[in-house]
Amino acid sequence: MADPATTAPEELRPAAAGLPEPALALFRRRDFRRAYAAVAVSELGDAFQYIALMWFALVAGGPLGVIAVRLADSLPALLFGLHGGVAADRWDRRRLMISADLVRGLVLVPVAVAGLTGHLPLAVLVAAAFVLTAATSYFAPAYGALLPTLVDRRNVQPANGLVRATADALSVGGWALAALLLAFLPISAFFALNAASFLLSAVLLTGIRARGAGPADDADRPRIREGFAALRPRPVLAASVVVLGIAVTLSSGTWIVGVPELVRSTLGRGAGSFSLVAASYALGSICAGLALARFPIRRKAAASMVAWLLYLPAYTLFALAGSLGIALAAGLGAGLGQGAAWVLVNSAAQEEVPDRMLGRVTGLISLVHRGAHATGLLFVSPLFAFIAPESVFAVAALAIPLTGLAGLFVSARATSARARGRHRSPRS
């Protein structure tokens, strides 16, 4: 009997393949338009909330308060990411996304009220950040698994590129708009704006006809190990997921603390310059998303590992940065690398993995990507307390690309070994 984890389902067979549509043509699809609008509006709300969350955390607890909130904002991915993937394969994916949006919207209402009344302790911020990311750990796998249903598998790369570019553009635009709104609104109102964005996202999602997955019988209940089994016959995709986790751990751990410290201590500049470097990173990610929305890549999983090579020139520039212009170029390169890697590894999974197991694989990718921010903060960021930023960036400039190359090498060896094994096996 064929292994259900390795047998190609109907939707993955060559007859179902074809050239992808132009990215803008995807807006002709009603369900994709609504999903795109839902993600866009919640991303804009997140941009407002990020400003408020970090500011209140700093006021309430200083730098340690910011670290506590960032950890609360990352750790739930490690705790709930795998279960979120199981849920996406067991239940109606559209309803799961709506439920996650409602939870995220409702949890922000008391936070906004507390902020407006001047009684917003650090513990409430930490708890809210934890719940928000826990809910996102269910939204992200469901969205990732539903997307091929909305646009067809051949169109997942342009769809992911378009969504990634839009999300990053709205983040930068949201930060700029937040500066203008602060002239008229208290900063705690941003929590209310984000709550409204999640509720509006839920309303938009209710109009999607496609649902994906569905209730599973107890005997056929999805199990976490089946998600890992789906990656076993796909060594290049499996390697790209591992590389994503290691590379994001190194890149986020150096970025979160290292870039502000580099701007302050080496360049002698303030928060405004750090904002510009952050914007240059977002610009790089936007460019990566737009390019991948336009130009199809055949071997997406392998290309995602190649994308990490862009960190060699990017972080080398950070290590040598003597001016703001060099730091801006470094941020742009880092954004290009990570933005491309994220789009490609998600698109590879959405193309290669059967629908019945896709939620668990996208849940694993979400866990690896979001959870790596926590591991980076815990294991890499503390290095800046003992080592100069330039030295840490120099090491990371080598370590991140080497991670990508190692993934390519290991996956190539595994693919070759599988091919030799099939060649030696007796024909049925």
Image (spheres, helix red, strand yellow):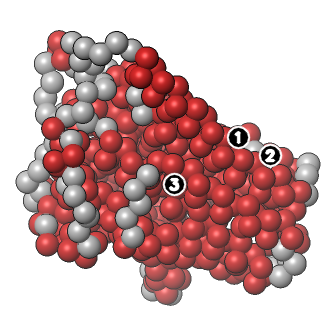
| Labels 1 and 2 touching (C-beta < 8 A) | yes
- In the figure, is residue 31 to the left or right of 332? left
Disc 3 on helix, strand or loop? helix
Q: Earlier in the sequence, mark 3 or mark 1?
A: 3
Q: Amino acid at mark 3?
A: Ala
Whole-number angstrom distance, CA of label 3 to CA of label 1: 29 Å
- Which residue corresponds to the image point at 52% horizontal and 53% vertical from the top-left? 304
Q: Is residue 213 visible?
A: yes
Label for residue 378? 1
Whole-number angstrom distance, CA of label 3 to CA of label 2: 31 Å
Which dot, 3 or 2, sits closer to the camera? 3
- Which residue corresponds to the image point at 21% horizontal and 41% vertical from the top-left? 13
Q: Amino acid at mark 1?
A: Leu
- Which residue corresponds to the image point at 13% horizontal and 67% vertical from the top-left? 29
| Relative image position of residue 58 (x, y in whole percent) | 66, 60
* Residue under label 3: 303
Q: Earlier in the sequence, mark 3 or mark 2?
A: 3
Callout 1: few (<14), some (14-19), or many (20+) C-alpha neighbours within 10 Å? some
* Residue under label 2: 382
- In the figure, is residue 189 to the left or right of 19? right
- In the figure, is residue 403 to the left or right of 385? left
Whole-number angstrom distance, CA of label 1 to CA of label 2: 7 Å
Q: Quadrant of the N terminus?
A: top left
Q: Quadrant of the C terminus?
A: top left
Q: Is residue 63 visible?
A: no
Disc 2 on helix, strand or loop? helix
Callout 3: few (<14), some (14-19), or many (20+) C-alpha neighbours within 10 Å? many
| Relative image position of residue 31 (x, y in whole percent) | 14, 61
